[in-house]
Image: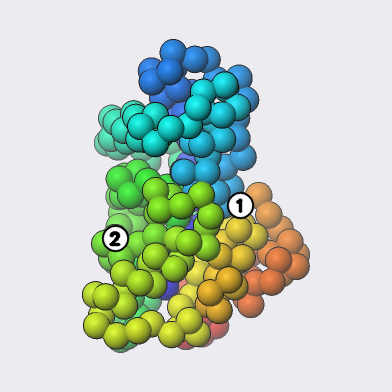
Amino acid sequence: MLWDIDLTLVDLRGLGGRWYTEALATVAGVELTAMPSFPGRTERAITTELLATHGIEPTEELIQRVWRELIELSAGMAPTLAGYGRALPGAAQALAALAEREGVVQTLVTGNLPEIARHKLAAFALDTHLDFGIGGYGTVSAHRPDLVAHAMKLAAAKLGEAVPPEAVVVVGDTPHDVTAALDHGAVAVGVATGRHTARQLVDSGAHLVFDDLSDTEALLAALL
């Protein structure tokens, strides 16, 4: 099970823009005037676009400096992060129920940096049932399907056996999540808790679409 985070498990809208505004000012001394699109994109894609849009060459050194600043900002807010958002309906129950099923391994495919992924989920006690070590994160690539391939490779190495694509389920709220699954022959599950409707997720090719994660029994029956 490869879970997206933002607007799939938690809603912390607005924080990404706030952190990038502060990070750009600190790292480059530049005021943010244009905000990249966030939903379904990776941190590498967002940071690269942000720097280029503001006339700054997105070298790897600068990208890493921005990321370090983002992590520091996130860490500083970690103790109070829950006050800036909420866990989405059914998220905790779904993670816990799947954790009880033999043969199910849960991790992440998220555009977030690994450290920020932990902060966001820990804020709502959603970090217990996930194997963070085999996730695909936004540091890997600007191309989201690469994150799925990365997670599958890490999982296979840890489990000691290949992970067949049909045994991989990607859950997310955007067409980017759906495409990332389909590109590798995995099962694509859309959740209409973000900025895209259920119809848009169906049209993007999702095998299954839920309005949210609140019906745990229906979700497990469909996924398993």
Q: Residues within 10 Å of mark 1 (few under 14, many from 20)?
A: many
In screen coordinates, is 78 left or right of 85? left
Front-lying residue, 21 or 120:
21
Which is more N-terminal, label 1 or label 2? Answer: 2
| Residue indicated by mark 2 | 132
CA gap between label 2 and label 1 equals: 23 Å
The vertical placement of 31 against 119, above or below, is above
Instruction: Return the x and y of residue 145 as percentages of the image width and height.
Output: 52, 63
Which residue is painted at 54% across and 83% down in the image? Answer: 222
Res. 208 in view: yes
The vertical placement of 49 against 188, above or below, is above
Amino acid type of the residue tagged 2 in the rendering: Phe
The mark found on residue 194 in the picture is 1
> What element does badge 2 sit on?
helix
Q: Nearer the viewer, mark 2 or mark 1?
A: 2
The mark found on residue 99 in the picture is none
Instruction: Return the x and y of residue 195 as percentages of the image width and height.
Output: 66, 49
In screen coordinates, is 179 left or right of 220? right
Amino acid type of the residue tagged 1 in the rendering: Gly
- To which quarter of the image does residue 203 belong? bottom right
- Labelled pair 2, 1 in contact (Cβ < 8 Å): no
The vertical placement of 54 against 119, above or below, is above
- To which quarter of the image does residue 205 belong? bottom right
The vertical placement of 69 against 4, above or below, is above
Front-lying residue, 201 or 134:
134
Which residue is painted at 48% across and 75% down in the image? Answer: 169
Instruction: Return the x and y of residue 34 as percentages of the image width and height.
Output: 62, 25
Front-lying residue, 84 or 25:
25
Q: Residues within 10 Å of mark 2 (few under 14, many from 20)?
A: some
Q: Where, quadrant-wise, is the N terminus in this rendering? A: bottom left
Which residue is painted at 32% across and 73% down in the image? Answer: 155
Res. 108 in view: no
